[in-house]
């Protein structure tokens, strides 16, 4: 059994903006089930404080002259102990974890997450008198990047793991910020936190962690190349011996069509005929024509370039002349929100766009749709295609990252050999997207084959169990390597 301190800037159900929230909410629970002693560290955002029930103050500290309390609670619905870094001066404000109400990044994000990292470092070294010393410190994304860097300066430190959920977000700030944060001069060099004259939080993880992981095997290879490496591919290549990809899992407690409390009509692969009631229900709710035979395409997503919105927008004129209903739930960049909403106003019978964040609707769209739209430019893992597979909602995806690792194209050969579970674009273009949607519609009109594909999709085990085992093996390896230094 290892003692694992798992550190993330979001974790479902306390706070979530995307897939990182899902992962940080479910991997610690899976590790606990496998008898690991795991604690989760999160910032105490107001939304989090509102959701917790029992809590007690376990420690106090001060960083940059700001008082910080460590609040202990449990992750709702689990037995995972959570330590909240409560620094009201930087975390207690309306808006999101990273941005204000208008989607603008908080201008003190470097300070906010430096405080978070410094608290996590003290927890890692058992300096806050919580009487618990981890063997493993597992960090996630740039918000936690300073932790491996600062820990590297201590000889008696736990082993460190850094997981890249998305290399496109790096936490880069100007050089002045490095001085303002009083970071040790020792860390300011090309092979340290410096990134072309700027301070890079993510480099702290990539350079100093004992082991680096990312969330799918394919993405672990893609980030070694310039296109997906965002200037860090050279460094990652140098460290590739310590880099591996472990696929995300899904939390069966929340994402299971047989028990999903958001669904009026629950179903599983043995009662697939009931799935359609979710579609008629959603058609009624969204004022779409009631029609069971028309394929419904769903999408639940951050509305950002990564998710392939440009080729979707380019395809819409043709797509909306096809016999489909398209339902999009999302929020993100304003220009996408506006353009999609305008298209929806012009085609109320074909396209519904719901701008906002809505957990219940996200589940209901997965259950109602026949086809799921996810033509991402890149996708480190992607959880929505996994949810879609689990819900018998066949994904249309690009051949990248975690999408390539989980979706098997409905080619004739794959249909015949029983492997097919979705549709893969030949290339990332609107032409390819349209051909693929057309292909999906054609297969949809062959109910027997469609049903078989749904069963293929729903039969696979996407739970965390296997991936959690892979993390445990990696922790043990990191510990062995670390001890032998
Ligand atoms: P990413 O982390 O890049 O956003 P993922 O597919 O890994 O992509 O995970 C996205 C998660 O966020 C899923 O759980 C998805 O259901 C959820 N999500 C995204 N946008 C919304 C939204 N507008 N409302 C509800 N859930 C959303
Ligand atoms: C990131 C990625 C997504 C991944 C998620 C959780 O947000 O964009 O592909 O599934 O992290 O690891």
Image (tube, rainbow, N blue to C red):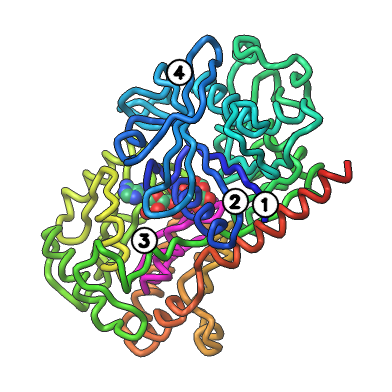
- Front residue of 325 and 214: 214
**Of circles 4 and 1, which is in front?**
1
Q: Is residue 3 left or right of residue 370?
A: right
Q: Position of residue 62 (x, y in %)?
A: 54, 16
Asked if the magenta segment contains residue 380, the reply would be yes
- Considering the numbered disc 4 on the image, is that residue within a helix, a strand or a loop? loop
Q: Tell me the distance, in whole angstroms, between the alpha carbons under discs 4 and 3.
A: 34 Å
Q: Quadrant of residue 159?
A: top right
Report which residue position mark 2 lands on. 37
- Residue at which label 1 appears: 2
Q: Residue at x 88, y 45 (%)?
A: 484
State which tag comes first along the sequence, 1 or 2.
1
* Circle 1 SS class: loop
Q: CA distance from mark 3 to mark 1?
A: 27 Å
Q: Is residue 146 visible?
A: no
Does residue 271 show up?
Answer: yes
* Residue on which the image places disc 3: 254
Magenta highlight range: 371-398
Q: Is there CB contact under 8 Å for labels 4 and 2? A: no
Q: What is the distance, in whole Å, between disc 4 and disc 2 at their CAs?
A: 36 Å
């Amino acid at each position: 059994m290892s003692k694992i301190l798992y550190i993330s800037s979001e974790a479902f159900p306390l706070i979530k903006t995307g897939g990182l929230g899902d992962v940080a909410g479910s991997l610690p629970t899976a590790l606990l089930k496998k008898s690991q002693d795991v604690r989760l560290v999160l910032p105490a955002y107001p939304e989090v404080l509102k959701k917790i029930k029992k809590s007690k103050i376990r420690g106090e500290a001060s960083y940059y002259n700001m008082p910080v309390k460590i609040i202990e609670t449990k992750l709702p619905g689990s037995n995972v102990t959570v330590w909240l870094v409560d620094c009201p001066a930087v975390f207690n404000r309306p808006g999101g974890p990273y941005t204000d109400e208008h989607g603008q990044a908080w201008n003190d994000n470097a300070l906010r997450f430096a405080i978070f990292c410094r608290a996590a470092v003290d927890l890692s070294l058992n300096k806050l008198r919580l009487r618990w010393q981890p063997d493993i410190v597992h960090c996630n994304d740039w918000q936690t990047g300073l932790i491996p860097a600062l820990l590297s300066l201590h000889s008696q430190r736990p082993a460190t793991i850094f997981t890249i959920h998305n290399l496109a977000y790096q936490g880069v700030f100007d050089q002045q910020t490095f001085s303002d944060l009083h970071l040790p001069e020792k860390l300011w060099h090309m092979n340290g936190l410096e990134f072309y004259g700027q301070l890079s939080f993510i480099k702290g993880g990539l350079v100093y962690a004992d082991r680096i992981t990312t969330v799918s095997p394919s993405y672990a290879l893609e980030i070694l190349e310039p296109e997906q490496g965002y200037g860090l591919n050279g460094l990652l290549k140098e460290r590739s011996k310590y880099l591996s990809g472990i696929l995300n899992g899904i939390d069966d407690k929340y994402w299971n069509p047989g028990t999903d409390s958001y669904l009026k009509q629950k179903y599983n692969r043995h009662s697939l005929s009931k799935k359609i009631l979710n579609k008629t229900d959603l058609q009624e709710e969204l004022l779409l024509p009631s029609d069971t035979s028309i394929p419904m395409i769903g999408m639940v997503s951050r509305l950002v370039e990564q998710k392939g919105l440009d080729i979707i927008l380019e395809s819409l004129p043709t797509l909306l002349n096809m016999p489909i209903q398209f339902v999009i739930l999302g929020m993100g960049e304003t220009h996408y929100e506006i353009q999609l909403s305008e298209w929806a106003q012009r085609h109320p019978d074909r396209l519904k766009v719901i701008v906002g964040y809505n957990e219940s609707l996200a589940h209901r769209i997965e259950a109602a749709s026949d086809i799921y739209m996810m033509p991402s430019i890149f996708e480190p893992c992607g959880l929505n295609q996994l949810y879609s597979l689990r819900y018998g909602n066949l994904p249309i995806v690009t051949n990248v990252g975690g999408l390539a690792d989980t979706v098997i194209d409905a080619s004739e050969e794959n249909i015949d050999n029983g492997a097919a579970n979705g549709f893969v674009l030949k290339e990332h273009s609107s032409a390819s997207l349209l051909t693929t949607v057309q292909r999906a519609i054609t297969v949809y009109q062959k109910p027997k084959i469609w049903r078989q594909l749904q069963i293929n999709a729903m039969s696979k085990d996407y739970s965390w169990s296997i991936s959690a085992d892979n993390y445990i093996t990696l922790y043990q390896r990191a510990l062995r390597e670390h001890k032998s230094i």
